[in-house]
Image (cartoon, grey):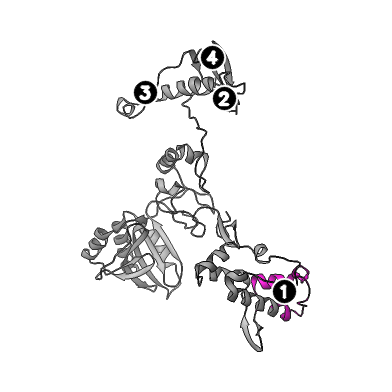
Amino acid sequence: MAIDRITVRGARQHNLKNVNVEIPRDRLTVITGLSGSGKSSLAFDTIYAEGQRRYVESLSAYARQFLDQLERPDVDSVDGLSPAISIEQKTVSRSPRSTVGTVTEVYDYLRLLFSSIGLPHCHLCGAAITRQSVEQIVQSVLALPEGERVMILAPIVRGRKGEFKKELEKLAKDGFLRARVDGELLSLDEEIRLDKRRNHTIDAVVDRLLIKQGITERLSESVRTALKLTGGAVLVSVIDGEEKLYSERMACVNCGINIPPLEPRSFSFNSAYGACKRCHGLGTVLAIDPGKLIVDPHERADKQSFLGAADKQGSAYLKSALLAVVEHFGASPAVPFSALPKAVRDAFFHGVEGQITFRQGQYTYQSDWLGAVRHLRERMNNPPSEKVREALEELVSPVGCPECKG
């Protein structure tokens, strides 16, 4: 019969007076009472302490030497108890990545557990991710349209910090001529200096091929070389196209989706490895908020001011763009911005098809308008001054990541 409760008999720890209590398992139980009534003595100093003591005693003598030795609490018996954790109530630094698991360090143990015994599944068909043979990898590459140019790459380093001088020197000694470092093709004959404080990705260029008849043997040899060099992974990059990671260990046979071997950092909240490249695992991105761009929606369209004195040039351009959009749709600039047709407001924020007429004093010209949101995003990526950057940052708000949907 399954144990469904924790039974405490004769608890006398601190101010407890021979307390007997039964607490149901698999439920949230709250202990309440006046200050000094023994809540913490029962929860932490008796139940938690006894759970921790039993857990430590179950470890080897070698492991116990690194842990604090806990004394047995003053209690007759505690039955139905599992290894316990307690969460200390304290003020911690706020972080969008923080969870109960990270604050209590349980997350570290879960990462080790998932990376050791986890079985990944395909997110499209739900099938378990399995290994691929050299023949399967070769057939998948040969299925590309004839005439495509591909590079066979061996992923040596993936998202790790360091200078990797030894790795690059070894590649050169082994006869490789080029490597792709952080997305840039470099010659191994030249000195390659990397910032040891930044994450880097290094792929050795094993071969470059044109998909056509008669390349099966050469392709097979190149794939084997890459697999041997990396211990079971090969990256196939279509020139000016997509890339696909193949693995002798982890691949969906139905959808062809490949994933790298599971590692503790695959489940790390602090590592961007394996996370969405757009939001880096946060689920949100900072984007220009149209609601913050229009300070007073009840002000006339031709009287709107956007960035004020912080960016007079940018504000003047946005005002001329708004008037150009209003004229393009045949609306009146003398009405409040909120009274403009929705099509006009959307076109100002997100752009219009084709060119519209801009006016700067007596000068007129035709130009594309891609929208205030895109214009400000590009301006924020390359601001003309620190003052402008600070003004633009006031216009951003967190929104759900459009790539991973949060």
**Three-letter amino acid code at the position of disc 4:** Leu
Say if residue 262 shows up in the picture: no
**Coordinates of residue 114 in the picture (x, y in percent):** 44, 42
**Three-letter amino acid code at the position of disc 2:** Arg
* Label 4 packing within 10 angstroms: few (<14), some (14-19), many (20+): some
Which is closer to the viewer, label 1 or label 3?
Answer: 1
**Distance of mark 1 from mark 3, alpha carbons?**
73 Å
> Which segment did they paint magenta?
325-353
User: Of label 1 and label 3, which has the lower sequence position?
Assistant: 3
**Coordinates of residue 385 in the picture (x, y in percent):** 50, 70
Q: Which mark is residue 18?
A: none
Farthest residue in the front direction?
309
Kindly identify the residue that appears in the image at 48 percent across and 41 percent down: 102
Kindly identify the residue that appears in the image at 31 percent across and 60 percent down: 224
**Label 2: element kind:** loop
User: Of label 1 and label 2, which has the lower sequence position?
Assistant: 2
Q: Which residue is mark 2?
A: 25
Q: Which mark is residue 16?
A: 4
- Tell me if label 3 and label 4 are in contact, CB under 8 Å: no
Say if residue 7 shows up in the picture: yes
Q: Which residue is mark 3?
A: 69
Position of residue 64 relative to residue 316, above or below, is: above
User: Of label 3 and label 4, which has the lower sequence position?
Assistant: 4
64 vs 141, nearest the viewer: 64
**Distance of mark 3 from mark 4, alpha carbons?**
23 Å
**Three-letter amino acid code at the position of disc 1:** Lys
**Three-letter amino acid code at the position of disc 3:** Gln
**Distance of mark 4 from mark 2, alpha carbons?**
22 Å
Q: In the rendered view, does 124 fall on the left or right side of 186?
A: right
Kindly identify the residue that appears in the image at 75 percent across and 72 percent down: 300
Q: Which residue is mark 1?
A: 303
Which is closer to the viewer, label 4 or label 2?
Answer: 4
